[in-house]
Image: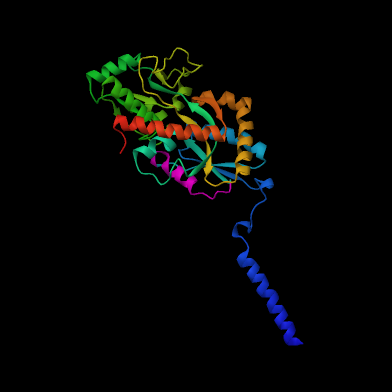
Amino acid sequence: MLKQQKLGFGSVVAAIVLAIIFCPIANVGAEDLSAFPSKPISLIVPWPPGGGADLSCRKISELASKVLKQQILILNKAGGAGVIGTAALANAQPDGYTIGLLTSTTMVVTPHMRKVPFDSTKDFTYIMQIAEMTMPFCVRQEARWKTLKEYIEDARKNPGKLTYSTAGPLSVANMFMEQIAAEAGVKITHIPVQGDSELVPQLLGGHFDGGVSNALTSHLASGKLRALAMAGDSRIREYPDVPTFSELGYKAKMNNFFGLGAPKNVDPVIINKLQDAFKKAWDDPSFKKFEPTVGHTPVFRDSQAFTQLALKEFEEKGRVLKAFGAVK
């Protein structure tokens, strides 16, 4: 009788072990999607704190956290012209608790210029576009150039002596200005820095002659900087007298998108929840008012439309860079 009882107990244990072995691993500890998010969310910004992209992410995250009823933590992972932070996002757990900032620089330009540890066409889920960045090309107010034409003519007379800076090497702004210089037939020396938080004070301090960044927009009103042209499809409403490069006869284009993404394979239910929350934050009047102060034009595209834009830009920019001789 005792032996039978032991065999019975052993059979139960064996059954439990077999059940665990053959139970799908994905279901072990799986979160109820209806309860998402049940803990704070991390948002990776691949640039240093203090720049326009960082400030914009902080603003919209503050508003979205109220909708989600969970804190959204900003993680600045700068370096490599945005590559380090973007790679961290690609390698994060696809559970929706790590999202990040996706920009034209990291997703469209840099992958064509050098080897990166991610595939921008396959390794991400595009959640939504937030804005486009219209970047002014600025010089200090006391600079001798009053127009872009004067700056270009000076560069023509002094090849390589005039300088400009952007928030990083191989950035969208960097490649745009190289195209402008090529069109004009001049040589201008690029002095890259690590993010807008370095670019702004160094331009104001006279470390280089000009700078291209959306973060410079907020300094135009102070009178410390003068914008010679806008790198974008349209003039900035707050500075209607500053022409675009296109209006001045240049063919180079810069579609500088700014949006949120996640690693690939995040459940669509979670992506929809994140998109809905951040769209409500995007619709908030305080966000719409804030964006122009950091040089952003609010532009919304949902997950599908944002994906299509990013893939189209990747293909088209690749052709442009190849024709320009910039693809390695």
Question: Could you tell me which residue is drawn at 41 percent across and 17 percent down?
Answer: 244
Range covered by the magenta-colored residues = 80-95
Q: Quadrant of the N terminus?
A: bottom right
Q: Which residue is the extreme one toward the right? A: 1
Examine the rendering and report whether any part of residue 257 can be seen.
yes
**82 part of magenta stretch:** yes
Q: In the image, 195: left or right of 29?
A: left
| Front residue of this view, candidates 60 and 268 | 268
| Front residue of this view, candidates 135 and 223 | 135
Q: Position of residue 190 (x, y in %)?
A: 31, 30
Examine the rendering and report whether any part of residue 205 can be seen.
no
| Front residue of this view, candidates 169 and 267 | 267
| Front residue of this view, candidates 39 and 28 | 28
Q: Which residue is the extreme one toward the top? A: 241
Q: Position of residue 15 (x, y in %)?
A: 67, 72
| Vertical arrangement, residue 276 with respect to residue 41, above or below | above
